[in-house]
Structures are given as C-alpha cells and as structure tokens.
Image (cartoon, helix red, strand yellow):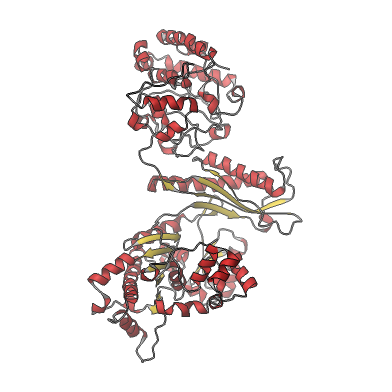
Amino acid sequence: MPVAKPESSDASRVIAHVDMDCFYVQVEQRKQPNLRGLPTAVVQYNEWKGGGLIAVSYEARKYGVKRSMRGEEAKQVCPEIQLVQVPVARGKADLNTYRTAGSEVVSILARKGRCERASIDEVYLDLTDAAEKMLAEAPPENLEVVNEETLKSHILGLDNERGFDAKENVREWLCRKDADRRDKLLACGTLIVAELRMQVLKETEFTCSAGIAHNKMLAKLASGMNKPAQQTVVPFSSVKGLLDSLPIKKMKQLGGKLGSSLQSDLGVSTVADLLQFPEEKLQERYGFNTGTWLWNIARGISGEEVQGRLLPKSHGSGKTFPGPKALKTIASVQHWLNELCEELSERLRSDLDQNKRIARTLTLHASAYKSGVTDSQKNFPSKSCPLRYGTAKMQEDALNLFQAGLREFCGLHNTKPHGSRNNGWRVTGLSVSASKIVEKPSGTSSIMKYFHGQNPSSSLSKQSQDEDIQVPSASESCSEMNLSEQQMKFRGEDSNTMCQMPCLDQQEHKQDLGEDQNPSCLSPTQGQDDFQEASFSTSGIDPGTECCSGLINQSEQQRVFPQDQCVVSSLNRLEPKRKTMNDKGTNSILKFFKKMDPASSCSSNKEEHCENLRDVEALLSNPASVSENGRCVEERRERIAWSYNVDEIDPSVIKELPPEIQEEVRASFRPNKRPNIVRRGSSIAQYFLPTRKI
C-alpha cells in the first residue's frame, strides 16, 4: 500500500525524469547505422508469427505499428519495416547489451545531481542543489543567449496569445525577473536538463526526453508528454490543469486493484473526481496512510525522494511459456530454472566484481494454472530464501522453492509432486530474482584464517579466488576449507566425494605435510557446482547445514605417509588424548553443523577412496615433496595452540559459536581476567579436534 510521506520541501525541489526514446531500437541502430531513419522494430527471439515487438521506432509508429503486434502483422502494416531480433542466450532474451548502454547514459546524467536508476532506460534526477547554485551564481535572467535545445522546451500553462512564437515565449518565461523562487529554480533545472540531454546525444548517440517538476510523480507524468527528444516543464501553477483531466488509472500505483476500487467504490474516473473527497473520508475507506497519500496526489503533492541509486535494487531473470509451451513436468521446470539461475549467477558475480555488492534474498515467482480451475492462474505463491552464491546452489534452492510453492498450489502438503505425476498443473511463467542487495562489508574476514598459520588470502588457488564469494549470511555456513598453494589434491577426486571438516591440530599437520585428502564439506548437489566455497560465511554457522564425515583412520595415515615416520608417531601420541576427551563426553563441533546421521553423510565409496590414496602415495613417493613439506614434531607442537589477533576477529563470528564456549571466548578477550574455562574438556580448540571414524 502507498505510504504518505512528508512534503514540507516539495515545492522547492527540482526533479527531472529522463526517459530514453525507443531505447532498444536506438541501441540496435547504433550497432547498425544503416537502420537510422528507417522504420525499425526489435522483436523477441520467439519466431512464432515473426516474434513479438518489444520496441518500435517513431518512423514505424507513423505507419500504425504498435508494440502489441507481432512481426508478421507489423510487416502487413508497414512492408518496409526492419525487424531486428533481440540477442539470445540460454533460450531467452539477453538484455545485457541494453543494460550496458543504459549505464553509459546514467554515468553522464549523474554528473549534475543525485541519480536514481528506475529501469534500463529511465532515470530520476534531483537537481535541487545544482539549480540553487546556478540561481545564486548565474541566474537565467542574466542570460544573453539561450541554447536552441532549451528553447524547444514545453512549459505547461504557457500560451501564445501575444503572437510570439513558441521559442520566444520559452525565452521570456526562463528569463523573468519577477518570477517567484520556485519558477526560477525550475528555469535553472530546464537549462541543466537540456545541457545533459545534449551531452548524452554527443557521447552515446542516444536521444532522450525529460520532464522537469517539483516532485517525482509530476516529472514522470511530464516526460512522456512530448516525445521524442524533447522536454516538458510543470510549473507549480500548472499542476491542477495537468491532473484534472488525467484518468485515475494513469497515476502511478493506481493502475491495479486500488485504482479499480476508486472507480467501482467511489465512482472516480479522473484525478479531478478524487478532489471532491475529504481526507478523512479517504482515510476511513482506505486507511490512514493510503487515504492521506490519495488526498496528496490528487493535488500534485508527493514527498517521495530520489534515492541516489545508480545501480539496480535487484537482479532478475524470467521466461514465459504461453499456450502449448506451458511446462508440465518437474524435469522441464528444473531445466529452465537452471538456465535462469545461471544467468542470475553471472549478473550477481559481475555486480560483486564491479560494484562490491552482494544480494541476500533469492525469490522465485511463477505463474501457473490447474486444469479445470478457472481462477488458478494468479494463485501460485512466491517463495523466498536466503541467497547462496554459486550456480548449483542457486539452482538447487530455486527448485526447492518451486516445489514448495507447487505443493501449496496443488494442495499437496505431505507429498512432493514428481515429473511422472502432474496432477493437472501447467506452468506458464518462471522468474528468479536476487534482492536485498547491500555493499559487501569491508574488513570482514573468513573464520578460517584463525585455523591457519598463514593469511587465507594467499592460500586460495586461482579457481577459488574466481569462484568463491563470502556472503555475511547465515545461509551459507559450511563450506570448503581454505587450501594453501603447496597443498596436494587427489588427481582423480570425484566431485561428489565428501569428507569430514578438519580440526585444529589436524589442520596444523596438513600445513606442514603433503595433503592426503581434500577437506571439503559439500552436499551432493553442491559438489557438482563449478563454484566451490572456500571459506566459512563471516556471519556464522548454520546448525542446519549438512556436513559430511569420515576421516582417514590411523592405519590409512601410516600407509599414506610411509616416508615420514615422525609424523605417524606424532599422530599416535595424540590419539590417546583424543580418546580420553571423547570418553569424557566432549562432542565434535560437527554436531552443530548437521541434522543427519553422520554415518550416512559420506558419499565416497571404498574403491574411489583407495584410488585416491594411491594417487597420494604416488605424490609422496617423491622425496623432494616430502622434505619440502615436512616439519619437526616440536615445531608442530608449538603451533598446536590456536593463535589469533583480537582486533581481527569479527564479533559476529563469536555470536555464532556454541553458547557453552561463547563465555570462554569473550573472557579471553579481557586480558586482566582469567578465562572461565569449563573443566569438562570443552575448550574452543577441542571443538575442532578430529573424531574417530564412524
């Protein structure tokens, strides 16, 4: 529901809405200059009846071509029309070319004021500061020459009764000395917007139209009144004349149910009709906030601010499946969700790399219907969950969201629909979106840096650096441990092989010795993904995250490291201590990572494991590699203690540790107090000691 916002400074603001002219066509004409001046349209990749038109040039509109037509129909109306197909990727329209071109325009417009990108081809500008500066330093009344582009402006309420031509009337209105401050600020805004539009044309070859007013609502209404390549100004005195005859459904946020309610319940067809209702009546009918908002917009009052956003608030990818193309099986839905998530993942990765932003929420929208149910088209529920970075993880979550929505849609709350059992549903549209985008927190580190003796940033391989994204969200809490560049992996390792997370003392040995296994912690689906997480989430550990078990036992370690007897003996000496601690009831911290039976969570089979061990033996058969990675036992004993720098620890990490050790950690931060260590053997280091193989 709309919310009333303060409008105290509404009349002193200068707001512009800039809208690109048939933008997709302009982008294609820039790529193919021979199309300039010709009737042109951009069509969808769907070739049925020539594809649906998504953008039509003004030359084609003169022949009666409309966006609601398909290519074949447009050819009948205008045989000379040039049809350009939108780029295609993953079986759907690829709009990246248009997004990039829109960013070029935004970068130019943002030079003069606070800029809010509303879509690919439209932008809001708050020019109040720039207008006030111009009014103070070089007011329009002192101008001797006004550029031609500014003189082409349309000033609402301006007439030509005195016989002057339109441009002369505009010049006189701009340079009035007796105008009030509000109109003088608008005059300054008019000059600024004309200059920006000329600059956009010069640098990008794109034309645009604009509306200039005292708020976003009026500027938006004005920008489309005179197209293409023109601008319209709404002085305060002309607001009533603009709104009175405007259909109520044309107002922003009144095109849906609220506008229909005004028409059916109150008999309102134009904005002027809304003026007859007192504020109290509207508040009584629609609630305080909505009623106040309706009363304000009927008078041209809006306190909505320009948000100062150059980047989109969300990313999304969608596809429709009309008529016989409707999806009927889970397998077909999964296929298209995979395609959509792949595109979304690429855009999120690009946003992270270029803008250092991360998204927190993944949302799935679908449109579907059930056979024999007439009102089922709009009843498919939207579902959301915390967003996990990585294409396969996103694909898995999207499918789970769809299945949850489908169970609710079909009334199957206890069973999961399968591809072989359709239950009469058809999916006509799918989309996935990433929202709640925030700047990536600076200064946050992976929790794994405290389990290593080196900087984790230097221990990531190139692949990990390219593919791992650390998101401060509890949704991503169990991931692959950081590996040093000197560590060795299984050359024949299967992507589905899972093993238990290394603990403190074992991790220290792994830094000193050649690795005998990959300390990853992946679900079966995650293991198939190209994106492998290389650290914990900075926000903490999710108790519901699946983890896997199965460490190499002592005999296997002896077989893998035959040339380093000191290591084996060291491990043997540590084993009684571990056994004593386990006998005392000390549980592995892995219990906080999983809800499943650890004995059933390891997916590697015996043959694969033996083959992997043989690969490691081959690696270790090189004495140089062993000597390079070997360390003396005494040195490892010195490093067995968990060392850290208090200033580098993110407090949010501590909050996610088990409650029984939080007090110990916090106490250790206070140097004048002795840590309150529980005497049951549950120090923080011991939560990361290896457990015996189950």
Closer-to-camera residue (523/200): 523
Q: For residue 204, what is the image quadrant?
A: bottom left
> Could you tell me residue 673's position as x and y percent?
35, 23
Q: In the figure, residue 482 lies in which quadrant?
A: top left
Q: Quadrant of the C terminus?
A: top right
- Counting from the top left corner in percent of width and height, residue 175 is at 28, 80
Residue 650, visible in the rendered structure: yes
* Nearest to the observer: residue 285 or residue 653: 285
Q: How many labels does the image show?
A: 0
538 versus 98 height, above or below: above
Residue at the far front: name it: 280
Question: Residue at the right extreme?
Answer: 372
Where is residue 269? Give x, y as percent: 59, 76
Q: Residue at x 35, y 38 (%)?
A: 443
Q: Is residue 380 left or right of residue 392?
A: right
Q: Which residue is drawn at 37% across and 20% down?
A: 674
Would you say residue 534 is visible in this rendering?
no
- Compared with 206, 688 (above or below) is above
In front: 492, or 661?
Answer: 661
* Residue 232 image point, x, y percent: 41, 75
Query: Which quadrant is the N terminus positioned in?
Result: bottom right
The picture quadrant where one finds residue 97 is bottom left
